[in-house]
Image (cartoon, rainbow, N blue to C red):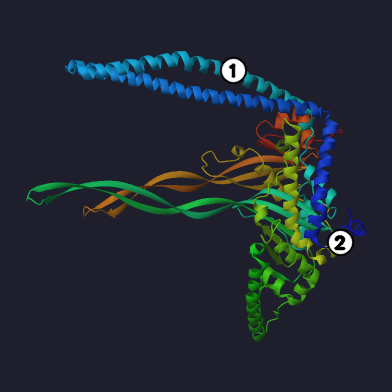
Amino acid sequence: MSNETAAARGDDILEPLKAYQTRYENEFRRNCEAYFDGLVKQSGIDVAENKKTVSAYAAQMQLVEESKRLLSRYKGLQALFIAMIVLGAILIAASIVCFVGSDMTVGGILCAAGAALLAMGIGLLVGVALPRIRVNEKKREERQQKANELLQRAWQQMAPLNALFENNVTKKLIEKTVPLIQLDDHFNVRRYDYLHGKYGYAASEDPTRSTIGILTGEIVGNPFVVDRVLVESMGSCTYTGSLLITWETHETDGEGHSVTVHHSETLTASVTRPKPYYSEQTRLIYGNEAAPDLHFSRSPAHVEDLSEKARESRVKKGAKKIRKKQQKMLERGGSFTEMGNQEFDVLFGALDRDNDVQFRLLFTPLAQKNLLALLTDGVNYGDDFSMQKAGCLNYISSEHSARWDMEERRERYYSYSVDGARNLFFGFNCDYFKSLYFDLAPLLSIPLYQQHKPREYLYQEEYPRNFTVQESEYAVNRMDPTAFAPPSAATPSILKTSLACKEGKSDRLVVTANAFTAVPHTDYVSVFGGDGYFHDVPVDWIEYVPVQSYTVVEMKELGLSDREFFKEANSGVYRAAMEKHGTRAFGYNHGILCCVITGDDIGFDADFNVTKKV
C-alpha cells in the first residue's frame, strides 16, 4: 500500500491504546474467525461429525481413567494381601524358632497367627485381587483401544483442515486489521539497503550474536525490523568440592581413664572458572528521519503498578530532581529544560535527551497523552518497554517481546478437534498481534512519525548477495542444529554466515559454528582441618574450550507457501532436486529454501528454477 493511499483512507492511528481497545483487538479476532471459518468451509470437513467423535473420545477416555482408578485400587489391595502373606510366613518361621527353643506357648500363638494371615492373604490374593485385576486390565485395554480408534477417526476427519494451514497467515491478518502496518515476506536485500543507506542500520558481525528470529516491515514507508538474537556471554561458575576427614584424640574421663574420641569433619573448597552463558534478546529497530539529531533513552519502571497516590508522589519528587537538573545544565551552558507536563517528563523519563527543540517537536501534547496512557495502562503490558533514539534510528525492547513466540508454524494449529484447532489458531495469532502492536505502540503514539514520509531513496541496481546476513542466519538457525555443531561441542552454537559466492538467484554460504567443548579437570585446594593439618580437597570443574566447524549451505527464494513447497518436494517439480541437494539437512522458512551441501554439489540454482507455476 502506498503512503498516499494509507493517508487517504485515514489509516493513521492518533491514539494507539484507545484504537487497540475499541477497534483493533476485536477486529483482529473477527478476522481470525472469518479466516478460520473460511478454511473449515474450504476443507469440507463435517464439523458436527467431528464434534460428535471428539465428544465420544472424551467420554471413552473417562472410562479409561475409571478403569485405571479401579486397577490402582485393586493393585493396592494386591500389595496388602502380599504383605499379609509375607508377614504370615515370618510369623510361622518365628514359631519354628520358638518350638526349637522349647517355648511351646509362644510358638503356638505365632504359628496360629501366621497360618491365619498366610491363608487369608493367599485366599484374598487369589480369590479377589488377581481376578479383578485381570478383568479390569482387560476392560482398560478394550476401552483404551476404542478410545484410540475414536482419536484416529477424529484425526482423519480433521486431516483436510490441518492440511490447509499456512505459515504466513498471521502477517496477512495483521495487515488486514491495521493497513498502516505492512509486513515483508522476509528481510530482503532492498529493505536492508534502505535501512543501511538511509538510516545507518548495520548487520551485526559480532561472532557472539546470531539471528534466530526476524520480522521486517514498514509504517507509512518508514521501515522497521524486529530481530531476536542468541547471545553468548562469558561469565563465571563456582564449583564446590568436599572431603570427609576423620581423626582420633585421647582424653581422660572423670575417673582418670584414658578414652579415645573419634572426630569427623567435612571440608569444603571452591574454585571459580570461566563459563559461557546463552540468552535471547529481542528488539524492534525503527527508522524515521523526524528529529534526526535527537538522542535519548528511557527504561521501564512499571508505573502501571502504582496507586494514584503513589504515582502523584513519584511525579512530585521527580519534578524536583528535574528542576535541579535544569538549573545545573543552565549553569553549565546546557539547553536542558523541563517539559510543561511534569507527569510525562517524570514517568517517561528521557532525561538524557540532547536536543530540547527536536524533543519537543517529537513529543507534542498528543504524543505525551498517548505515551502516558501506555505507561499507566494496567490492562495490557503497561510500562514494560525501554526506548532509545539515536538519530534516525529508534530502538524498542520490552519484557513482553522477550516472551513473544515469533515463529509462524502451521503445525502449531494441528488438532483432532475443530474447537481445539480454533483455540490454537486464535490463541497464537491474537498473542502475536498484541505483542507486535504494543512494541510499535510507543512509535505510533508519536503523530510526527506517522506524518513524516521518507524522501525517495536510490536503490542499487545490483546487489552482491541475494539474502541479508540476518535472513541467512535465521535460515540456518531454523535447521537441525546438529547439522552445524562441532562434533565435540557441549554448548549451543552461535552460527555466523559468510558469502562464498552468488549463483544467479541463490547464495552459497559458509556457516561458521562457534561453540565450546567441555574438558573436565580436578583442582586440589588446600584446606586446614580440625585435626590441625592441611588437606587437599578435590574440586571438579569444567574448562570450556572454543571449537569451530564450517558447513556449506545454499539458499534460494522459491516464493511458495510451506504447504505448496512440501507438496512439490515430495512428489512435484522439486522432488529430483530435493533428492540431490536436500538429503543432508534443509529448512524452508519465509518462502526460502536452505540446504546443506558439499563443495562438489553444483546446479543448485538451476535445479530449483521455477519453470512453471506450481
Judge whether 495 appears above or below 347 on screen. Answer: above
- Could you say which disc has been placed on residue 139 in the image? 1
Q: Position of residue 122 (x, y in %)?
A: 40, 14
Indicate the secondary structure of the residue bearing disc 2: loop
**Dot placed on the residue nearer the N-terminal end, 2 or 1:** 1
Q: Nearer the viewer, residue 69 or 565?
A: 69
Q: Residue at horizontal 66%, vertical 20%? A: 146
Q: Is residue 451 left or right of residue 536?
A: right
Q: CA distance from mark 2 to mark 1?
A: 75 Å
Residue 581 against residue 204 in the figure, above or below:
above
Query: Residue 574: horizontal and vertical position, in percent?
Result: 78, 30
Q: Is the residue marked by circle 1 packed among few (<14), some (14-19), or many (20+) residues within 10 Å?
A: some
Residue type at numbered disc 1: Lys
Q: Position of residue 107 (x, y in %)?
A: 23, 18
Residue 196's disc is: none
Do we see residue 504 in this rendering? no
Name the residue beneath numbered marker 2.
456
Assign a secondary structure to mark 1: helix
Front position in the image: 5 or 192: 5
